[in-house]
Structure formats: C-alpha cells, structure tokens
Image (cartoon, rainbow, N blue to C red):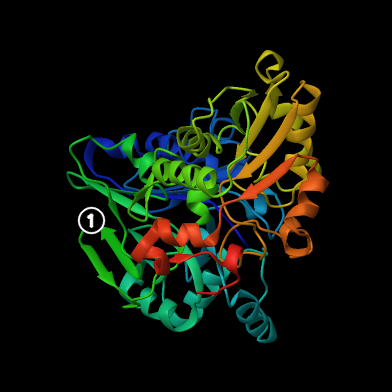
Amino acid sequence: MKEECGVFGAFVQGELETKVFEIAKTVLFHLQHRGQEAAGIVISDGKRLKQHKGIGLVQGVFANGENYKGQIAIGHVRYSTRGRSDLLHAQPLIAEYLGHEIAIAHNGQLDNADEIRKNFEKQGTIFITRSDTEIFLHVLTRNLRKPPIEWSAKEIGEIFSKEISGSYSLAIATANKLMIFRDPKGYRPLFYSKVDDNYFFASEDSALKIITPEEIDIKEVEQGSYFEISKETIEKGKFSESKNSAHCFFEFVYFARPDSNIFGHSVHVIREELGKLLAKEKPVEADIVVPVMDSGFSASLGYSKQSKIPLELGLVRNHWVGRTFIKPQQSIRQQSVKNKLHPIERVIKNNRVVLVDDSLVRGTTMKEIVNMVRLAGAREVHVAIASPPVKYPCYWGIDIPTSEELVASNKTIEEIKNEIGCDSLAYVSLKGIKELLGDEYEKFCLHCFNGRKK
C-alpha cells in the first residue's frame, strides 16, 4: 500500500490513562492533512486491545464520545493508493496469534512487498488485505513463533533489517507494550516527546506540540532505531547502522504542515525559499502573485518577496473541503477543486496573475484553476511551480501515479503550458534545490524529480 499516512503512539501512566483516547484523537486531528480516507485508534488496557476505526475524517469517525482507558495507544489516519478505500484496509490492523493480540499502524511502503507476498502465498498463506502493513505481521509471526506479548523490539528490528526493504514509520501495540520503529534511511518523518514518565510519538512534531508542554523538547526518532516501552522497561536502540539517508523531499513540497519541522528544517521556511528560488530563476512581468491555497502559500510569500510583486488573496479556499491531491480518484479530485477554490474577481480582474503552487503532478487540477482565473477576468495567467517537474512514480509512500499519468514524464514544458492553458509555466530547477540544500542534498530522496533510487 503506497501511503502518505499519519501515525501516533503513546505510553502513559496515572491520570493520563483516562485521557489517552482523547489525546490520540487530538493528535490524529492534527495529522489529518496526511490522510483523509479513514482513521483509527487502538487502546490497550493491559489485557485486551480495544479498537475504534472508521471511514472518513477524524472528527466524524470519533464523534460518538468514546473514551477507552489504558496505558498504550496507537493511531492512524489513512491515505491509500493500493488497496480499497474501505473499513477492512483502515488502520491500525489487529491480528491474533497464539492467543494474543497485536495491532500495527504504518506509514510508508515496502520495496519488496510483492516478492514477500508471492513467497507467502506459494507457501499457502492467505492475505486479508492488499496492504503492505499486513506483510509485517506475516513476516514477524513466521520468524518469532511465540505470543506477541513475548516479542521484543530488538529482535523485531533484527528481522526488519534482514527481510524488509523500504520506507516505514511503524507503531506496534500488544497488551503489555508499545514498540516504535523508523526505517534505516528515514524516508518518512517521525518524532517523540517525553513528558514525565509518558511517551508520545507522531509523524510530525506540530501534532505533538498540541499535547507537549513548551519547555519539553520534541525530538526526531533516529533512522534505523526502535523504542520499546512497558511498565517494566523502557528500551531504545538501533537495529540498523545505515549511514545513508533518503529523506523524502516531497514532504517539504506538499505533505507536511507548514508549522512542522522535519529533517532538521522548518517546512514553511523551505517552502518560502523555494518560492524565492523560483522568482530568481524564472522571473515574469506581472501585477499580482496569487497563491493556490493552502500548500502554495509559503512559496507564494517567497516569490512575492523576491520579485517585489504584491501578494494578493485572489483565490479563497473552502476549508470544509479536503486536500485534492490525496483524494483516491481523479473524478473526485476534479470536483473537489471546484468546491474548494473560489476566485475574488475584484482582485483578479484586468491583472496579470502569477499563480504559485507547490507541485504539478497530473495537470488536471491546475487546468481547472487556470480556467477559473481567466473567467474571473485575468489579462494573463502565469503558473509558477515551487518544485521541479514530477517525472517518475514514487515507490516509497506517496500517491504519485504511473509514468503515463504524470504530465511531465511525456510532455515538454511548452506542451504542458498549452495543455493547462496558461501564458507561461515555470518550475524550480534541480540545480537550484541542490544549491538550497547544500551539503545536505545527498541526504534527500528526490526520485520523483530525478529518477534516482536511493
């Protein structure tokens, strides 16, 4: 399952045991931008795992006032591209093995998922889902052959390092312990905070800030490391000493919240710098800069500062509509654009407009926006994209489709410009990103832009 999801984990004691379900809901709400198809929470009361999950947004799924109590919680918001958008595929997944339950929540994708699945099926294993997440469970039960309450994070990490390849931020709950893992290359972001004797984990630090006192540092989970937390022990260790990193640059481009800090950088600042870079590399004569809200705002601010062209609110976003990129079907994405963005004619009319957006993947969404701005009376419409052309499908956890669907994989910039109907089209260059990142450039995965697997 290619996913750009959000995961949560917690181990709490004392008074917080009565509040852990509410804490999980709060964190998932602040990870909602990472997945809008389904949400789920699993709580351990020390004996059994209790689960609540459903299709839809966090506020809707957990609208009935549930309040499970316990020391351990894991949670998930889902955005899928493999497997159906149904309750069966909603996470966390729960399984029972040798009389004991285990729950798992996963953000990422495995390189060798198809190979592992085929080998299991040849041996007679039946899979219930199309999810990569289920593969973890089969790999672990085949190797460990003992009840999940006896599993240790250290031995699980050793299995992962030998048999699993790809991206994963992983939360595992059994009746008696919480286990957290981050893949050896650190494709996906993952953070934690320790408040007294309570531990909290989430895909972005912005979600943890909601529940963590200001004086408490929020730290990044090291790549290739694990946590195991129970009443008896707290263990942290490394299961892989890989020196190579492959941080997903598309997290900066689109997925992460602007108030998050990931891979050692402020998301907002990186996006603003990309906007400045775009204005330097591909300047145009225009009257106003208009952000494609919301993910294009930071880059628009940078573009405006660099170009000295005024930033104007020419498109208003309806915040009751979710993010269009992570809708599961193209027809839904197109309808969402019409529902989501509305032009302000008094701002746009008779002006030369620079539309700044974070990325251009299929091109269909931007075509709708350009047409919308023209109908509002723009004299010219220039499109500026604060990332390079997306030419290659992503294999490690983002819904970037096949090469045939990627508009930049088979069309020139001039052809794309004509297709979306704008007067000019500009992208940030890979050279510019390399200069922006400096010595850290090699730590990032830019496969969707340059075709290099890391």
Assign the N terminus to one quadrant of the image: bottom right
Q: Residue at x 53, y 25 (%)?
A: 310
Asked if residue 259 lies left or right of residue 62, the reply is: left
Q: Is residue 448 above or below residue 386?
A: below
Q: Amino acid at mark 1?
A: Lys
Q: Residue furthest front?
A: 285
Q: Quick one: 329 or 11, which is closer to the camera?
A: 329
**Pointer 1: what residue?**
231
Q: Nearer the viewer, residue 33 or 136?
A: 33
What residue is rendered at 57% in x and 61% in y? 397
Residue 319, position as x, y percentages in the image: 60, 26
Q: Residue furthest top?
A: 346
**Circle 1 sits in a helix, a strand or a loop, which is it?**
loop
Percent x, y for residue 102? 46, 61
* Visible residue check, residue 173: no
| Spot occupied by residue 230 in the image (x, y as percentages of width and height) | 26, 58
Give residue 379's quadrant in the image. Answer: top right
Q: Residue at x 62, y 43 (%)?
A: 384
Question: Could you tell me if residue 50 is visible in this image?
Answer: yes
Q: Is residue 167 above or below residue 382?
A: below
Q: Which of these two is toward me, 98 or 18?
A: 18
Q: How many marks?
A: 1
Q: Is residue 180 above or below residue 281?
A: below
**Residue situated in front as seen by the camera: 99 or 413:** 413
